[in-house]
Amino acid sequence: MNMLIGYGGIALFLAFIVFVLERTRRKGGGFSDYATAGRSFGPFYSTMAFINTWLPGTIFISFAGYAAAAGVVGFYFVLYSLLAVVLMIFLAKPVHLWGKRFDLRTQADLLGLRYGSKTVRVVAALIGIVASFPWLVLGMQSLTFVFSYLSFGRVPASTAVYIGIAVIVVRQLWTIRMGARGIIISDMVQGIVAYGIGALLAAGLLTWLLTNGHGFDQVDPSFFTLPGPDSAVGGLYFFSIVITGALGGWSWPDIFVRLFTSNSAETIKKSAVQAAPIVFVFGSLVVLLAIAASTLPGVSEAPDAVWFIAADIGGPIVMTLAGLCVLAGTMGNVGANLQALGTQTANDIVAVVTDTRAESRRSGQIAVAVMAAAAAAFAAATANSSTHLVMLALISYQGIVQLAPTIFFGIFWRRGNASGAVAGMVTGFVTAAVLQWLYPTSIPELGGLTAGVAALVVNAGVYVACAYFIPSSVAERARVDDLFDSLSGPVAGAEPATTSESSLR
């Protein structure tokens, strides 16, 4: 009976998501509509789209597990999320206005325009795809906990992983068909479940724990200290993981493209204001619950299962709701990742190689379908031996943040050029990969800096050096000045890109 409740709840939730998507599906539209949803969504949808993409289902697993194993250091994801929201406010105007004026569809598309370089565009696209793919595969595998726990002991993890992969792949049929519009609409429903119901569950379970002998006074005192200079990871470790998260957040293609789906710069700013308290309240509740639940039997042996171990207190109904939260968060993140990587492949690699401009919706659908099939194949092949994939994912996180100097310098500083962008991205990515392989946690010789932050210093130094020692041509400086000067003009009535401007990308 319990398994019927658990799996039945999943089936009903998936059926409701499909019902909503079918009721709101629109036929037609070109590639731009497929990639950006026509830049048509208001603040509420934009807020939920950002949150459901930003906070993956693994927030209830790996992130909660980290807090259950290490304590208050687990708040790092709350801090970097709030910093990322602040950056969202500053990115709103230039990204939206340039996106609308030049019909930009992806993060790499914007960088190609800013630097007037197809090389920058392709390199940025490749880094985004290579860095995101392992996380896409791990996202599919993360549903193992859901289908294992909601079977209430009837389905082993070795089987549950394949069930999870199959479910998330079937769900992506609507991502392939509908593109960004389907992602945004489903994010609204999934976000309410994952972070609305999730916050209520966390608050309720935390209250039960605190009033039933699992208060914070029972927790290991070391859980309430941050790593210091004499710690194993070093004094700069906490700073490093926070700054990597904040800057790296806008380096992920699926997060960045959310800026293109809103209907105005003001909408993006309102979304940031709305997202901040949601992220703060939800994130804090999950971390506090994980810390309090660290005293429950079984958590110290399997901290990643803390969300489900705590939910077991409430019986099958609460366990089912807990599983739906993870499923909803995972569907949002995996779907957004697939849609962003697929459109980036079609728009910024295939189109550049063939010297065309992607116009057909069909090309986006094919690219997303191929990406989904590849991710599913890797997820199934590594389902029971994903140790190396996890290491690759950790390396890729330090690698994706190497897009940050090219993005932020490019958007807020006129002097940067294509040479510096390419050299910085490549140097930073290679440096981060090597250092992460040698120092998986932090670099003792650098006071606890992580590989990604150490590589960022190299990356930014190369970028700035090229800006000063490799001067841009007069024509290029004039083009960049025109881009920045356009930000002070009227917002309404943005012009389409000219032929010459499009060819630069």
Image: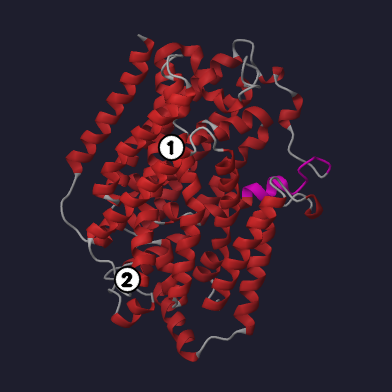
How far across and how far down the image is residue 180, in percent?
A: 30, 51
Disc 2: which residue: 101
Q: Measuring 34% from the left and 41% from the top, which residue is drawn there?
A: 187
Q: Residue at x 26, y 56 (%)?
A: 34
Q: Residues within 10 Å of mark 2 (few under 14, many from 20)?
A: some
Q: With 368 as the anchor, is 134 left or right in this view? A: right
Give me the residue at 21% from left, 34% from top: 19
- What residue span does the magenta drawing correspond to? 230-242
Q: Quadrant of the N terminus?
A: top left
The percent coordinates of residue 296 (x first, y second) are 62, 16
Give me the C-alpha separation between circle 2 and circle 1: 42 Å
Q: Secondary structure at mark 1?
A: helix
Q: Is residue 500 above or below residue 196?
A: below
**Which of 379 and 205 lies nearest the eye of the viewer?**
379
189 in the magenta segment = no
Q: Amino acid at mark 1?
A: Ala
State how many labels appear.
2
Residue 166 appears left or right of 413: left
| Amino acid at the residue labelled 2 | Arg
Residue 66 image offset from top left, x and y in percent = 62, 33
Q: Is residue 384 above or below residue 343?
A: above
* Quarter the C terminus occupies: bottom left
User: On residue 463, which mark appears?
Assistant: none
Specify whether residue 239 is painted magenta: yes
Marks 2 and 1: which is nearer the front?
A: 1
Give the residue displayed 52% in from the left and 77% down from the top. Answer: 418
Seen as rendered, the residue at the extreme right is 230
Report if residue 32 is visible in the image: yes
**Quarter of the figure with residue 359:** bottom left
Disc 1: which residue: 380
